[in-house]
Amino acid sequence: MERLTNESIDNDRIISEKLEELEREKEQKFVSLMIEIIVSITLKELYEEGD
């Protein structure tokens, strides 16, 4: 019985770590997307001013 409890705790810990990792990846992708949008808009404005 104790073995099952320990395995359950380990599984919960692993799941929690994976969820945290996925959340960090989502945040990183969001930040990258925001940076890409800002750079794109900035370059568009610069090109328009140059014309």
Image: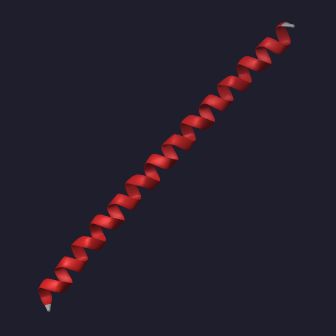
- Is 18 on the left-hand or right-hand side of 9? left
Q: Residue at x 51, y 41 (%)?
A: 23
Placement of 21 over or under 40, stated as above or below: above
Q: Quadrant of residue 16?
A: top right
x, y percentage for residue 47? 20, 84
Q: Residue at x 56, y 40 (%)?
A: 21
Which residue in the rendered view is the most extreme toward the bottom? 51
Q: Quadrant of the C terminus?
A: bottom left
Which residue in the rendered view is the most extreme toward the right? 1
Q: Residue at x 51, y 48 (%)?
A: 25
Q: Quadrant of the N terminus?
A: top right
Placement of 49 over or under 10, stated as above or below: below
- Is 44 on the left-hand or right-hand side of 8? left
Tally the marks. 0
Placement of 37 over or under 20, stated as above or below: below
x, y percentage for residue 3? 84, 12
x, y percentage for residue 17? 60, 32
Coloring basis for residues: secondary structure
Q: Residue at x 67, y 30 (%)?
A: 14
